[in-house]
Image (cartoon, rainbow, N blue to C red):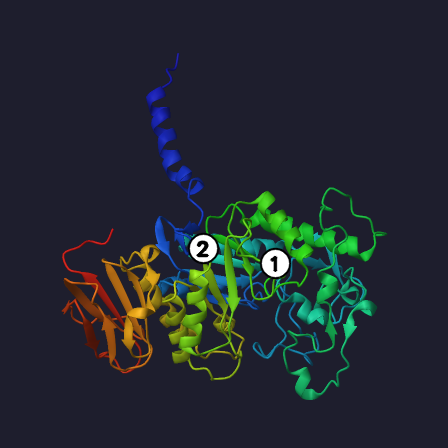
Amino acid sequence: MHKINLFGIAAISLVICVLTCEAVAKEKIRIKNGHFFEYNGKPIILIGDSATQSVMQNLNVNYKAWLDALAANQVNAALIWAWMAVPQTVDGLLVDRRYGYVVPDITPWVRSGKGSANDGKSLWDLTKFDRRYWDRIQNLVDYAESKGIVIVISVFDGWPKSFWSHPFNDQNGGPIPSEIVHSKPKVFTKRWLKSIVTRSRNMDGRQQFWTLSEYQAEMLGRSYDQSWPWELKNQYFQEKFAEKLLQVTCNNSNVIYELVNEGSSNKLYDDHWIRFFNKRCDSLIIINDDYTPFDARSSKTVDAISWHSHSMDTEEINYRWLKGFRNQPAKPVINSETVPGYYSDSPSVDDFRKIIWSTAMAGGSIFVQDDTVFAFDPESPQKPKGEILRKYLGVANKFFNASGIRIDQMIPHNRMINKGNAFALISEGKEYIIYVAENDRIDVDLSDMKGLLEAEWYDPSEGIYSERFIVHGGGSVSFDPPFSEDAALYMKVKNQEVD
């Protein structure tokens, strides 16, 4: 008779649990102290890159190389659009000029092999998902999670702006009748054919895409019927997509959903998706408060707010996010679109760096939307800015999120700046951060701080610290930044550990 070694079985079970239960028990990213986030046990602000119209749209984009580059720079977050049909034609007469060629595009749905869509390929079949897309987004989220990178997925963003190439356009196999879509006459010049169509120069189907059959009910329980009116089909296919997205990504600890970015102007539509996601998933939800027709801050079903600003003025950005920090109830406010233009060299990467710091100094999170990930397509001609931008994002991350600063205990306090273009973020009596946007002398009011402070300068361009020095509190103190451009001054009360 064989004896069963119960002790051995228990030991093996324990080892298995150690190896597997940790992943299962990994806590999702959450809100910390109202204004900030907490992930992997650490309070953070999100300082990330953006891949809105590239990584999930083009199979040639090497998303692992992109995430590796972010991780190498200690960048803690990235924003992606869930999907967007690339505005291009198979004959190459129309291409997205950020790629410069006809890319191997992908969407959540398969092509039917029948008919001809506006891009010259066959019509979409919205009743069938494309497994390549779903494997790609799941693998991307999993890989980012393994690198400690938070992924914000923008759901129902921007797509109707390019309705010409939209899968829901009936000219492409979708349910929305093109004859009811507002048309804008357009002369198809050679110059236009080489441009991107993100705002759909000839068709604008936003209002139709935002039209559902029943805003207070769901269509998922029904069996699809080709005879349905277009509004019901529209709702059904959107819900099937959202359900599948949640099935694939909700269990990840690093996922946040931004719903209806840039707003639908239809409160019923926005409310429908907030309920839909909250019913099925406990991950955080962001609403873009610039355009939404309701008060997202007061909503108990919205966790964080995103704003867009194309300003490159550091004082304007800091002031706006400062107001966002002070508004109640407290919620994280994210600068999720910073780009005045995708293609030009203006603003410079130095301008972007200063906007990153100006936002963070108001307690805000930020994604730099310059779509540097286009360069991770080996066929794309777009190479500028990316490496430097990722470096600057990483330098800011190292300071705010990886240096031991308790960012969740800090509040903006610009009133202590008596002179100079500078901003203050402090934990009174413990830590003080002063960011100097220009290389000017600053005067800082330390009259409430009677003791000694240990201080050091930090270079936002290179991520290096100066030698430490002692600052005497009790009055106004002048500082001359040691770097040629912007600079950050960190001060901590001497002989006091930060909790």
- Picture layout, residue 347 above or below residue 210: below
- Picture layout, residue 346 above or below residue 208: below
Give the CA distance from mark 2 to mark 1. Answer: 17 Å
Question: Looking at numbered disc 1 in the image, what kind of residue is underneath it?
Answer: Phe
Where's the N terminus, which quadrant?
Answer: top left
Q: Mark 2 points at which residue?
A: 330
Say which residue appears at 45% left-offset and 47% top-offset: 28
Give the image location of residue 254, x and y in percent: 46, 52
Question: Looking at numbered disc 2 in the image, what kind of residue is underneath it?
Answer: Ala
Q: Is residue 174 visible?
A: yes
Give the image location of residue 110, x and y in percent: 70, 58
Give the image location of residue 320, x and y in percent: 45, 70
Position of residue 273 in the picture relative to residue 117 (left or right): left
For marks 2 and 1 on the same chain, the one whose residue lies earlier in the sequence:
1
Q: Quadrant of residue 5?
A: top left
Disc 2 element: loop
Residue furthest top in the image? 1
Q: Mark 1 points at which residue?
A: 294
Disc 1 element: loop
Label 1 packing within 10 angstroms: few (<14), some (14-19), many (20+): some
Give the image location of residue 413, x and y in percent: 33, 66
- In the image, 16 versus 439, the foreground residue is 439
Say which residue appears at 30% left-offset and 56% top-offset: 406
